[in-house]
């Protein structure tokens, strides 16, 4: 549980789902009161909870009596990402430290669609031992599934559930509460303004690749500063193409989305691609072997083997390794005959292809798309489109927030976050006045609207945070190190920088701008101080020149803190 500044309580919960919401849908053997436990977690407001319910195991469900309502039973866990089912008893019996490679997730969707063992996608020898024993020994009560015939007869189907009144969940939200909800970064907007030209170019690229029978060497590289709508534009185009496919105007295709930030290592991308194509989980070396056969040798994988594959890789620069083999393998697949693979790569670095080996940059191609930072008019249009139909902001407040963010970075996410925080301040202020019954004062102090003062408070909170104050007050060479880190990280496109390269940049800047040259020991001590304050993340181990350093905060915060440094006026030209 947590409490927000406006006094609302929120809780982190695990979601359960009904059979109708799974990929397989409700099957004849599903009980009326059956639920699936999912691996999806979420934050909900405590006001949305109506009352307590009971989710029982199969044995508890069979032995329960008709003495309550909102009673359900759950026997399987449902993976919302891979659409796999697994018995909860098998999950509880598995050791935590070891993983049996032969224990594949039970894909109930395949078993639901067939009544015989010949129609099953998995061979009998590959099925989990627990499921085989459950089929052969259905008379055994210890392993008898609640989905069996006995479970259906003696279950709690006679227990009725009280109908929840319609007015219970119909909490009338105020305009400020609606504004807070729609300005959340996780909220999917109804439309994506100011990127029509870029979306049209992406749509044309994908359509041409899908309609082409060969799809030979198709690769699009999208770059731009953070918060300019790169990923959201691609996903909006793919949703539009999906609707065209549903209407029959487009041939079938397979879409795979991968974010480099979610991969434990660059090689794990092979596992994710293979699992989305086949539904099976294997190691990354086996996955690489199977994918190479699929794209190069013609040994197709999965039911969608002959369909074009559109592969979206977000944060493409995180796949860089020392020998760049991962990027080479992935970008080499579209060049194979009949590979039917289309790759869309997204990164923040503009000149990433030039930093790659020639054999990789040649395969990436020359087709690129640049997303420039938003200006204040575009940011104002984005915020206004989100708040369409919600009268909670003054026009001057939105313009002020847009101009402030556009002058810094042009990051739409930062603008939405500032406006959302300002709405929280205004909502808290209005509720405080309502509690003390000072309606006249409430009307005089904003009248329930987000005003300029709320935006100013939100900007102060965002841009005057403690870590920004630490950056502003750090020593002179500490500021140079932070600025050099931002410069090197942007230039390399990587998430970390070696201390040796960082020191070389600092020496070069100090020499050009006639500053006193520091020593290596001085720079190491300053980096250690920045690491102690958690401004910089330092690699564990001995202090040496090859130590890796990483910024713990966005580069925009460093730019804001150091751009107008009085003791280092020349530093702004590097930021």
Image: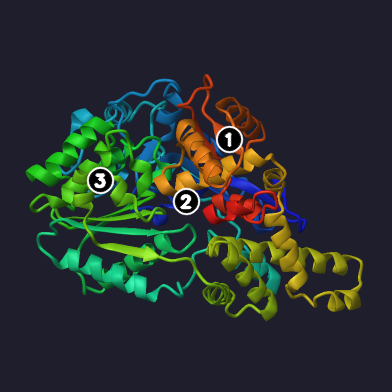
Q: Earlier in the sequence, mark 3 or mark 2?
A: 2
Quadrant of image for the N terminus? top right
Quadrant of image for the C terminus? bottom right
Q: Indicate whether 200 appears above or below 551.
A: below
- Residue tagged 1: 517
Residues under numbered marks 3 and 2 in contact, where contact means CB atoms less than 8 Å apart: no
Q: Which residue sits at x=43%, y=44%?
A: 261
Q: Indicate whether 436 appears above or below 87.
A: below
Residue 196 picture location, percent across and down: 38, 75
Q: Indicate whether 543 appears above or below 313.
A: above
Q: Is residue 459 visible?
A: yes
State which mark lies toward you, 1 or 2: 1
Tag 2 secondary structure? strand
Residue 359 picture location, percent across and down: 18, 44
Q: How is the image coloured?
A: rainbow
Q: Is residue 52 visible?
A: no
Count residues near mark 2 (Cα–Cα under 10 Å), then give few for <14, some for 14-19, many for 20+. some
Tag 1 secondary structure? loop
Q: Which residue sits at x=40%, y=45%?
A: 492
Residue 17 badge:
2
Q: Which residue sits at x=57%, y=75%?
A: 380
Q: Indicate whether 404 appears above or below 330.
A: below
Residues under numbered marks 1 and 2 in contact, where contact means CB atoms less than 8 Å apart: no
- Residue tagged 3: 110
Residue 191 picture location, percent across and down: 45, 73
């Amino acid at each position: 549980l947590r409490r927000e500044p406006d006094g609302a309580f929120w809780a982190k919960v695990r979601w359960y789902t009904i059979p109708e919401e799974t990929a397989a849908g409700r099957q004849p053997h599903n009980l009326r009161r059956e639920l699936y436990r999912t691996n999806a977690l979420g934050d909900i407001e405590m006001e949305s909870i109506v009352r307590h319910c009971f989710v029982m195991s199969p044995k508890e469900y069979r032995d329960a009596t008709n003495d309550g309502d909102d009673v359900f039973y759950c026997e399987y866990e449902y993976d919302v990402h891979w659409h796999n089912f697994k018995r909860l008893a098998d999950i509880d019996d598995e050791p935590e430290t070891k993983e049996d490679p032969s224990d594949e997730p039970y894909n109930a969707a395949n078993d639901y669609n067939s009544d015989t063992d010949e129609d099953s996608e998995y061979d009998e020898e590959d099925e989990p031992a627990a499921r085989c024993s459950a089929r052969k020994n259905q008379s055994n009560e210890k392993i008898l599934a609640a989905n069996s015939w006995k479970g259906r007869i003696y279950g709690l189907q006679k227990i009725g559930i009280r109908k929840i009144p319609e007015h219970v969940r119909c909490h009338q939200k105020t305009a400020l509460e609606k504004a807070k909800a729609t300005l959340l970064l996780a909220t999917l907007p109804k439309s994506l303004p100011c990127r029509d030209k870029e979306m049209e170019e992406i749509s044309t690229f994908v359509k041409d690749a899908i309609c082409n029978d060969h799809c030979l060497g198709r690769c699009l590289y999208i770059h731009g500063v953070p918060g300019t709508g790169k990923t959201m534009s691609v996903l909006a185009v793919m949703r539009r193409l999906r609707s065209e496919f549903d209407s029959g105007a487009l041939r079938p295709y397979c879409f795979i989305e991968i974010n480099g930030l979610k991969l434990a290592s660059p090689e794990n991308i092979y596992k994710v691609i293979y699992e989305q194509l086949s539904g099976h989980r294997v190691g990354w070396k086996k996955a690489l072997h199977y994918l190479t056969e699929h794209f190069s040798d013609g040994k197709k994988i999965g039911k969608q083997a002959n369909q074009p594959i559109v592969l979206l890789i977000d944060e493409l620069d995180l796949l860089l390794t020392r020998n760049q083999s991962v990027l080479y393998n992935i970008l080499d697949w579209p060049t194979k005959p009949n590979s039917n693979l289309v790759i869309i790569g997204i990164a923040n670095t503009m000149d990433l292809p030039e930093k790659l080996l020639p054999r990789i940059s040649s395969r990436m191609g020359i087709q690129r798309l640049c997303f420039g930072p938003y200006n204040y008019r575009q940011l104002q249009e984005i915020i206004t489109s989100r708040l369409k139909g919600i009268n909670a902001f003054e026009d001057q407040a939105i313009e002020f927030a847009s101009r402030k963010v556009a002058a810094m970075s042009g990051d739409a996410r930062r603008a939405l976050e500032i406006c959302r925080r300002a709405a929280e301040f205004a909502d808290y202020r209005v509720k405080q006045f309502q509690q003390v019954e000072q309606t006249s004062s409430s009307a005089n102090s904003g009248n329930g609207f987000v005003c300029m003062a709320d935006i100013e408070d939100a900007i102060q909170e965002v841009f005057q945070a403690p870590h920004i104050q630490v950056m502003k007050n750090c020593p002179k060479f500490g500021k140079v190190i932070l600025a050099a880190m931002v410069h090197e990280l942007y230039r390399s496109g990587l998430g970390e920088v070696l201390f040796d390269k960082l020191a070389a940049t600092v020496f070069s800047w100090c020499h050009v701008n006639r500053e006193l040259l520091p020593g290596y020991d001085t720079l190491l001590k300053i980096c250690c101080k920045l690491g102690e304050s958690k401004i910089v993340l330092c690699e564990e181990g001995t202090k040496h020149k090859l130590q890796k350093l990483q910024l713990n905060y966005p580069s925009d915060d460093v730019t804001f803190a150091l751009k107008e440094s009085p003791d280092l006026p020349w530093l702004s030209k590097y930021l």
